[in-house]
Amino acid sequence: PEEDAKAEAMMKSQGVPWMVRKILMQIKPERKAYEEVAADGSKTLVLASKSMSGEFIPAKCISGWTHHSEFFGYKFETVVTWLAGGVLRVENHVYDKAKRKTTVTDTWVEGGKLMVRQSAEADSYQLVFENQGPI
């Protein structure tokens, strides 16, 4: 539908190759939220997104949390920040040989639904996730 077209346009403007865009568009977006409990009993909220491999990639919901990874020869940097109004912002910076490209994902709860808006440069799209099981 319309949101799929926006998502593909955003990936195209980010320089994602045609074949990779087609593969990514076949993946059903999924998110998981859970608590991670440290040995000292402290708890951290973790929001994980499903990757192309089917694995879930976690982002710890702590302002300033940063993660570095590599995928398909690209380097990724993920930075987490809490914004006013309870909005969780995750910035994904993708580095190729020439430049850095950034995708911003804002996540919040509205009316009992998990709302996710992704944007890159002038493009953006929004997803709504409904609870499929116990929280």
Image (cartoon, rainbow, N blue to C red):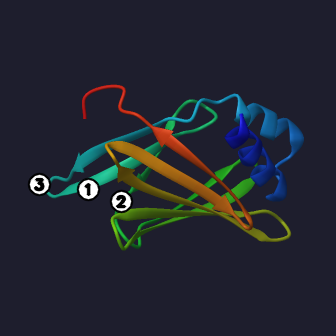
Q: Residues within 10 Å of mark 1 (few under 14, many from 20)?
A: some
- The Cα–Cα distance between marks 3 and 1, rounded to whole angstroms, is 10 Å
- Secondary structure at badge 1 equals strand
Q: Taking 74 as reference, is 126 left or right?
A: left
Q: Amino acid at mark 2?
A: Cys
**In the rendering, which numbered label is found on residue 124?**
none
Provide residue 81's location: percent of width, then percent of height.
Answer: 42, 70
| Sequence-first disc among 2 and 3 | 3
- Residue 22's place in the image compared with 80, above or below, is above
Name the residue beneath numbered marker 3.
Answer: 41
**Residue assigned mark 1:** 44
Check disc 3 and report its element: helix, strand or loop. Answer: loop
Q: Is residue 38 left or right of residue 93?
A: left
Q: Residues within 10 Å of mark 3 (few under 14, many from 20)?
A: few
Mark found first going from the N terminus, 2 or 1? 1
- Where's residue 46, x and y in %? 35, 50
Where is mark 2, residue-wise?
61
- Total marks shown come to 3
Q: Position of residue 78 (x, y in %)?
A: 54, 62
Residue name at image x 12 percent, y 57 percent: 40
Could you say which quadrant of the image residue 113 lies in?
A: top left
Instruction: Mark 2 and mark 1 in contact? Answer it, CB < 8 Å.
Output: yes
Give me the residue at 72% from left, 40% from top.
2
Q: Position of residue 19 (x, y in %)?
A: 86, 36
Query: The C terminus is located in which quarter?
Result: top left
Q: State the residue at coordinates (41%, 62%).
A: 88
Q: What's under tag 3, amino acid-wise?
A: Gly
What's the residue type where badge 1 is placed?
Thr
